[in-house]
Amino acid sequence: MLRRLLQPFWVLLAVIFLIEAWLWDHLEPIVERIVAKIPMRAFKQWLAERVDTLSPAVTLIVFAVPVIPLFPLKLVGLWLLANQYWLAAGVVIILGKLVGVGVTAFIFDVTRNKLLQMAWFKKLYEFIMAMRAKAAALVHPVKQRIREILLGNGEGWSQRTLRLIARFRKSVHEAR
């Protein structure tokens, strides 16, 4: 019983997790293209050379530090929400999210090999990758059902809605 009640909660968490993973996967190439357009390729090469000389623990600091400047942006978004500037808050929060994931993906690409040398980080990384696969498996039936409904594979929105209306009308007439 409890498991059935918690199922929507777990699906929601899985969807959020997969959205994060999707953003990560799709923003990393965009950041790579931006790096290719501006002279950041040299910066990436320079950073990669410096990371190679660092210990894995110091590399963790290099990985974490770029996210810190984005924290005030999130606070601005919260302030805008609190003061009911909904559109501006939405733009700032989404911009902060996209920039944060993009920068994190860029830095992780540079620091991944060093970070994975730490046993606890490697276990955490493998755990997150396993959770990502589990979330994808959990959400897959929901995505498949939505796809079937949208594509109208015999069970389109209109047919289902008409059946529900017919059932409702029948139950109303039987109640009289």
Image: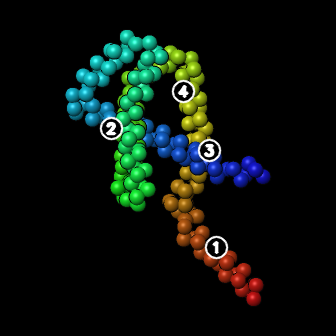
**Disc number placed over residue 33 in the picture, else none:** none
Residue depicted at 56% across the width and 17% down the height = 119
- The type of residue carrying mark 2 is Ile
Residue 140 in view of the camera:
no
Location of residue 136 in the rendering, given as x and y in whole percent from the top left corner: 57, 41
How many marks are shown on the rendered structure? 4
Q: Nearer the viewer, mark 3 or mark 1?
A: 3
Q: Is residue 40 above or below residue 70?
A: above
Say if mark 3 contacts mark 4, CB within 8 Å. no
Residue that carries the numbered disc 4 in the rendered image: 125
Q: Nearer the viewer, mark 2 or mark 4?
A: 4
Calculate the distance from the C-alpha at mark 2 to the C-alpha at mark 1: 45 Å
Say if mark 3 contacts mark 1, CB within 8 Å. no
**Disc number placed over residue 30 in the picture, else none:** 2
Quarter assignment of residue 67? top left
Residue that carries the numbered disc 3 in the rendered image: 138
